[in-house]
Image (spheres, grey):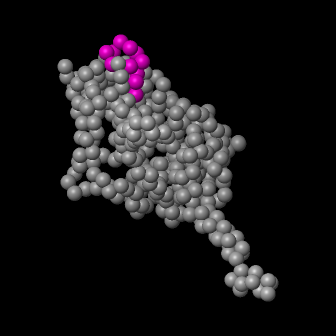
Amino acid sequence: MTFVPFMVRSSEGSELVSITLGHPLVDDYLEFVGARGARNTWLATAYDLKVFFGVVGKEPADVTTTDVFAFLAAQRTPRHQNVVRLEDGEAGLSARTIARRLSSIAGLFEYLVVRGDAGVERNPVPRGLAGRRPGQRGRGGVKLVRRPKTLPRVLSPVEVDALLGALRTERDRAIVLAMLLAGLRRCEVLGLRLEDITPGERRLFVCSGKGGRERIVPVSGRFFEALGEYLEQERPPEVLTDRCFVVLKGPRRGMPLTAAGLDEVIDGARQRAGVARLTCHMLRHTCFTRLREQGMSLEALQAQAGHASIDSTRIYLHLANDWLRGEYLRAAEAIDAQSDPTGGAEGEAA
């Protein structure tokens, strides 16, 4: 039998309430994801499964590992002739996107295996290829998707000033400063509620962090100045939502600002500022890079960023060029001090 997915999203106001693809087992899994994951995770999982079953065209119980490998090959096929990515020199979809899709597919089949009534006895998505011969000890294995470990780009001080000068409202300024000074993710900024803001203590409560993790983060007074101007002068009085940042004009005036709306704001400011490339996550990376350069410890950065593992925070050691340069110069000077260019040790022996 064949299965042709068709995505249907249902909303109540600005709240997404259901996503279906037209198959009872897949739709049950999407309901499971929606109940325990963030909105973006829910949407990404649904889209990944739509793409997968659109390529494979089979019932979940009929999917084999061969189908998964065929899907991988299709995803790696160049989408545009003579076009490659600068980060890894490859064509087709990025390795990160393919890895995310594999994770979504594997999650579905793990769910169906545990469920026990779906006719799926094993997960067709392999964890990797065997990397050692029978009888050999130690870990081995080859990942199905090789993800390049690239350093994210950060904005220079000149670019930051140009961006802030290109913003048109205090709302937009407060949003950018929340990412630039506190390191909030896009979804965390959009999820801020009025009750999450404590101006007297200059702190924010982040209740919509990645992985469902909550945290309290300090923020510079510059953010609260812009926020105060926005709340006093720009935020519509008839707002019915508790979300902090709302749409200021048009038919959606007073409704929560969406991710698409924020991306439009950021892209418009980028063009006016003459910045070649800009994303919300680049503002977050810029925040933590500058904090690390000023001596903030990795443990403090981890808490501010909301990272589950400090391994995710260590990237800012590589981005903080001034810090690395200072550490190197101190170590090099200590090495030089241990050697005597005049041959002092031999002179004392003589």
Q: Is residue 47 left or right of residue 177?
A: left
Q: Main secondary structure of the magenta part?
A: helix
Queried whether the magenta region covers residue 109, the answer comes back as yes
Q: Position of residue 106 (x, y in %)?
A: 38, 30
Give above or below for 335 relative to 2. Answer: below
Which residue does the image show at 25% across and 56% down from the upper left? 83
Queried whether the magenta region covers residue 339, the answer comes back as no
Give above or below for 274 relative to 171. Answer: below
Which residue does the image show at 29% across and 22% down from the upper left? 60
Q: Is residue 156 left or right of residue 336?
A: left
Q: Which residues are magenta?
A: 107-120
Q: Tell me the quadrant of the picture where the N terminus can be found.
A: top left
Residue situated furthest front in the rendering: 135
Residue 144 quadrant = top left
Q: Position of residue 176 (x, y in %)?
A: 51, 50
Q: Do we see residue 325 in this rendering? A: yes
Q: Position of residue 45 (x, y in %)?
A: 37, 31
Q: Tell me the quadrant of the picture where the C terminus can be found.
A: bottom right
Q: Do we see residue 169 in this rendering? A: no
Q: Nearer the viewer, residue 125 or 137?
A: 137
Q: Is residue 199 left or right of residue 125?
A: right
